[in-house]
Image: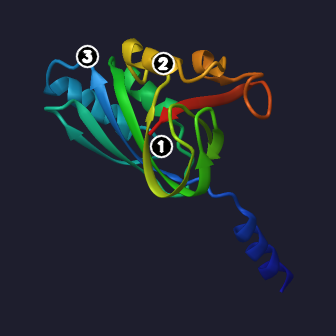
């Protein structure tokens, strides 16, 4: 009986990390279908990616992530870069459960910290899509447009700083996003 209670408590108290469900990324630098195939293969080698659907004409990839696994968006970017290309844009779909967001809000989602920029105050529920604004996820010109929405240093570094709730920790990656 003790074992059953312990198992139930462990399952009940386990953190849910499978909140990031899917992503669509557009790659740049492609010149042919062989380029697209190289990215496709690289993405399939990322352990938490369940499936990849390539659209060669648009140089885009629809990714579905495995349930119950932590998604590290930088690993997706690194796979594309490892194939010799770059990410031109990335939109991510995640399940939200009564999370309040607003400009400069930091929230934890699926093991990641998201810093929202240029969003009105709102409560997110259900599946919502956001765009990653960090370096190497967006052109520098597009990214520059969002700089005016924050004075926080983490926007430039991509790492938690003294400006972030919870304080500075060099090991904590912050993804800057908008909706």
Residues under labels 3 and 2: Cα distance?
A: 16 Å
Expressed as whole percent of the image width and height from the top left, the position of residue 139 reads 37, 16
Residue 80 in view = yes
Q: Is residue 61 left or right of residue 145?
A: left
Q: In the picture provided, is 158 more to the left or to the right than 165?
A: left
**Residue 20 at what x, y percent from top left?**
50, 49
Q: Residue furthest bottom?
A: 1
Q: How is the image coloured?
A: rainbow
The span from disc 2 to disc 1 (Cα, nearest Å) is 23 Å
Residue that carries the numbered disc 3 in the rendered image: 29
Question: How many residues crowd around disc 2 within 10 Å: few (fewer than 14), some, or many (20 or more)?
Answer: some
What residue would you read off at disc 1? Answer: 47
- Residue bearing the label numbered 2: 135
Task: Residue at 36% x, 24% y: name it.
Answer: 87
Q: Quadrant of the N terminus?
A: bottom right
Q: Which residue lies at the image location 61% right of the left edge and 50% below the top edge?
A: 100
User: Marks 3/1: CA distance?
Assistant: 24 Å
Q: Are marks 3 and 2 in contact (CB under 8 Å)?
A: no
Numbered label tally: 3
Q: Earlier in the sequence, mark 2 or mark 1?
A: 1
Residue at the outermost front position: 120
Q: Is residue 119 left or right of residue 153?
A: left
């Amino acid at each position: 009986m003790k074992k059953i209670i312990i198992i139930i408590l462990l399952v009940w108290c386990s953190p849910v990390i499978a909140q990031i469900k899917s992503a669509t990324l557009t790659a740049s630098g492609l010149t042919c279908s062989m380029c697209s195939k190289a990215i496709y293969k690289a993405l399939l080698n990322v352990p938490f990616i369940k499936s990849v659907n390539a659209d060669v004409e648009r140089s885009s990839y629809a990714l579905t992530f495995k349930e119950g696994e932590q998604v590290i968006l930088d690993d997706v970017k690194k796979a594309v870069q490892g194939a010799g290309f770059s990410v031109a844009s990335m939109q991510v779909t995640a399940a939200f459960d009564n999370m309040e967001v607003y400009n400069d809000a930091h929230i934890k989602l699926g093991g990641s910290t998201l810093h929202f920029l240029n969003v009105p105050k709102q409560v997110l529920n259900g599946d919502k899509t956001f765009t990653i604004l960090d370096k190497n996820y967006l052109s520098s010109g597009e990214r520059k447009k969002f700089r005016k929405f924050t004075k926080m240093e983490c926007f430039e570094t991509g790492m938690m700083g003294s400006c972030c709730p919870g304080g500075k920790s060099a090991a904590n990656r912050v993804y800057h996003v908008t909706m």
